[in-house]
Amino acid sequence: MSKSNQRKAYGLALVELGKQNPNVVVLDADLSKSTQGCLFEAEFPNRYFDMGIKEQDMMSTAAGFACSEKIPFANSFAMFATGRPYDQIRQTISIGKLNVKICGSSAGLSDYADGSTHQSVEDGALMNLIPNMTVLTPVDANEAAAAVFAAAEHQGPVYIRLCRNDVLDITPKDQPFEIGKLRVLREGTDCVIFAMGTMVERALEAAETLEQDGISVKAVNVSTLKPFDYAGAEAMTRGCKAVLAAEEATFIGGLTGALATALRKSAVPMDYVAIEDVFGQSAQNAEELMDFYGLTAENIVKKLKAML
């Protein structure tokens, strides 16, 4: 199967959105080539603003644009887009319910070479905890592009979480992004895997392996972390024997917690494949880190078989 890059798809989608809506503006924090905001800059230089290494100022400026009926997209590495300007995001953008769209690229462990300071294992959880914030976690480049248009149509703060590296093309190009919708990618009756972002590919691989052992697995793409469809998730697990959450992030405060809340009255066993309460580290490539932290199809298989 083919692979594509979420960041490039995001940048191209911003350009297309900018052609359709003159109120769209884009802000970067000295990382336009990494976020692909540079594509928007080349097309609309008068609507593009590089704020330098000043993420707090970038978010405050984005808030000002939103108050002036613009639709600002503010971009940076996921760690710097959420951690450094957390106060501005919480106090101004989210409390004010301002129409600001934040994109965190190079999320999770995907910025493998730069180590713990740049690897955002907690960005999704940070944004998930803020009232009024919507958190989108597209699985591939097609969903990343579609998420741009969905975010623009949504009134209020939105955080979009993107991977740095090429990811498997899983969803069709013409599929609209429906905020809050859980999508079943594979039907099954014995187990259910709820996977987010890069872990969807590994969930599908694990499902194929388990099928060879006579175990039927349903795989669900969680492309919206918040608002999470608690009732829908619970309904999808009825009658199954085991449930697992898979996310390239800390298990605290993200998909694992949301799924545990959804199943709080259920007797079905549940586990997770996620990053424990630790930071990332440097490596030669992203796959090396995924293996080290157990974010693999093999670990999914192992944990589901243990529950069964």
Image (cartoon, rainbow, N blue to C red):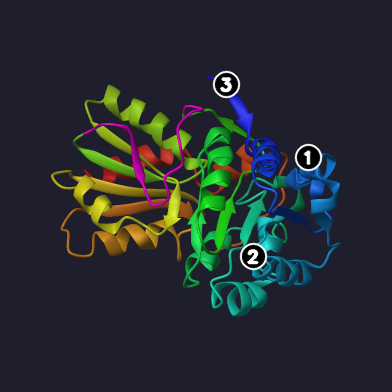
For badge 2, the amino acid type reads Thr
In this rendering, the label closer to the viewer, 2 or 1: 1
**Sooner in the amino-acid sequence: mark 2 or mark 3:** 3
Asked whether 240 falls inside the magenta stretch, the response is no
- Density class for disc 1 (Cα within 10 Å; few <14, some 14-19, many ≥20) is many
CA–CA distance in space, label 2 to label 1: 22 Å
> What element does badge 1 sit on?
helix
The CA span between labels 1 and 3 is 23 Å
Horizontal arrangement in the rendering, residue 75 relative to residue 232 (left or right): right
Q: Nearer the viewer, residue 159 or 24?
A: 24
The residue at 62%/72% (across/down) is 89
Q: Is residue 73 above or below residue 126?
A: above
Residue located at (51% from left, 60% from top): 155
Residue at 59 percent of width and 76 percent of height: 90
Which stretch is magenta? 172-188
- Residue 99: quadrant of the picture: bottom right
Residue placed most toward the observer, 201 or 235: 235
Q: Position of residue 122 (x, y in %)?
A: 56, 62
